[in-house]
Amino acid sequence: MSSQHQFQFGLNITYQEFLPYYRGEINKVEVIDLTGRTLWINARHFRPFLTSVGIKAYFRMTIDAQGNLITLIKI
């Protein structure tokens, strides 16, 4: 059994909508991956991807067996 798991999902959130996450007022971003699984990801991981229009991208996330983030990349 693999000790790593991959998920792919899209995120489309405006700059204004993301501000509470960026400021730490809301900690988790809820997304649904391409297979329909609901994931809650710490918002701090998305901060590098925030632009003036928000975050509009598809991502590939890899986590370890304990659920710790290994990579989050824009695809």
Image: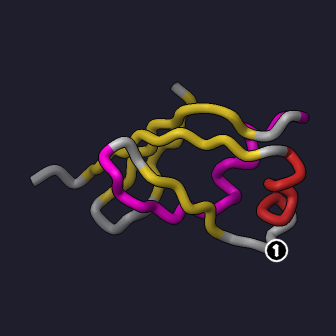
Please say if 30 is above or below 49.
Answer: below
Please say if 21 is above or below 35.
Answer: below
Visual colour scheme:
secondary structure
Whole-percent x, y for residue 38 in the image: 42, 61
Residue found 80% across the figure and 44% down from its top: 14
Residue under pointer 1 = 25
Residue 39 figure quarter? bottom left
Q: Is residue 46 magenta?
A: yes
Left or right, 14 with reference to 70? right
Residue found 37% across the figure and 42% down from its top: 34
How many badges with numbers are in the image? 1
**Badge 1 density bin: few <14, some 14–19, many ≥20, Cα 10 Å:** few
Q: Is residue 20 magenta?
A: no
Quick one: 37 or 59, which is closer to the camera?
37
**Residue numbers of the magenta segment:** 35-52
Q: Quarter of the image containing the N terminus? A: bottom left
Kind of residue at disc 1: Glu
